[in-house]
Amino acid sequence: MSLFGLGRNQRTFRPKKSAPSGSKGAQLRKHIDATLGSGNLREALWISSTRYEYRWADGVQIKKPIEVSAPKYVEYLMDWIESQLDDESIFPQKLGAPFPSNFKEVVKTIFKRLFRVYAHIYHSHFQKIVSLKEEAHLNTCFKHFILFTCEFGLIDKKELGPLQELIDSIIVPY
């Protein structure tokens, strides 16, 4: 199983090919599997920031918001986004087919939920990202995400609270 359960039954996230036995990649995979999957630690990580807690509800299978671990939230989110993207009544595949009247609302919900993952990463894992010297990559991805979001008004200002200070350093206050 890949990190956070991603890759399982996903078209957009696929596990990389297995590294040859004995290679550094195989050793790393063995270490990851042994440490991350060795107990309930992954289930204990909640999607939250310093003052915010996020719960999951998709309105179909889970109608009432429930508390879930961060990996479970990401798994639910990726499955839900995939189902939205695959739904031709929301994202038409045929050229010239009309988009539904609620299209922007669906896209706004997708972006709002993706933002929550960024908020969790920054509040709970940023020091680890820095230790891996990957903060520039994360910051670049987030900058592109937030600029696109602001350009098209995809997230309400009140939802941006957990990362407002970071957002203000990227763009003129939104």
Image: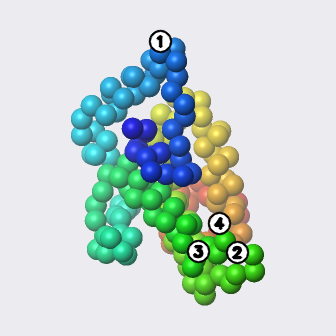
According to the image, label 2 marks what residue? Answer: 94
The mark lying in front, picked from 4 and 3, is: 3
Precedes in sequence: disc 4 or disc 3: 3
Q: Tell me the distance, in whole angstroms, between the alpha carbons under discs 2 and 4.
A: 26 Å
Relative height, residue 126 to residue 120 (above, below): above
Viewed as shown, does residue 139 lie left or right of 68?
A: right
- Tell me the amino acid under the disc marked 4: Thr
Q: Tell me the distance, in whole angstroms, between the alpha carbons under discs 1 and 4.
A: 44 Å
According to the image, label 4 marks what residue? Answer: 149
According to the image, label 3 marks what residue? Answer: 88
Precedes in sequence: disc 2 or disc 4: 2
- Tell me the amino acid under the disc marked 2: Lys
Residue at left 65%, top 49%? Answer: 141
* Residue 50 visible from this viewpoint: no
Relative height, residue 168 to residue 38 (above, below): below
Precedes in sequence: disc 1 or disc 4: 1
* Residue 33 visible from this viewpoint: yes
- Tell me the amino acid under the disc marked 1: Gly
Residue 22 numbered tag: 1
Mark 3 is surrounded, within 10 Å at the Cα level, by few (under 14), some (14 to 19) or many (20 or more) other residues, namely some
Image coordinates of residue 54 in percent, x first then y, are 37, 62
Q: Tell me the distance, in whole angstroms, between the alpha carbons under discs 1 and 3.
A: 45 Å
| Position of the C terminus by quadrant | bottom right
The mark lying in front, picked from 2 and 4, is: 2
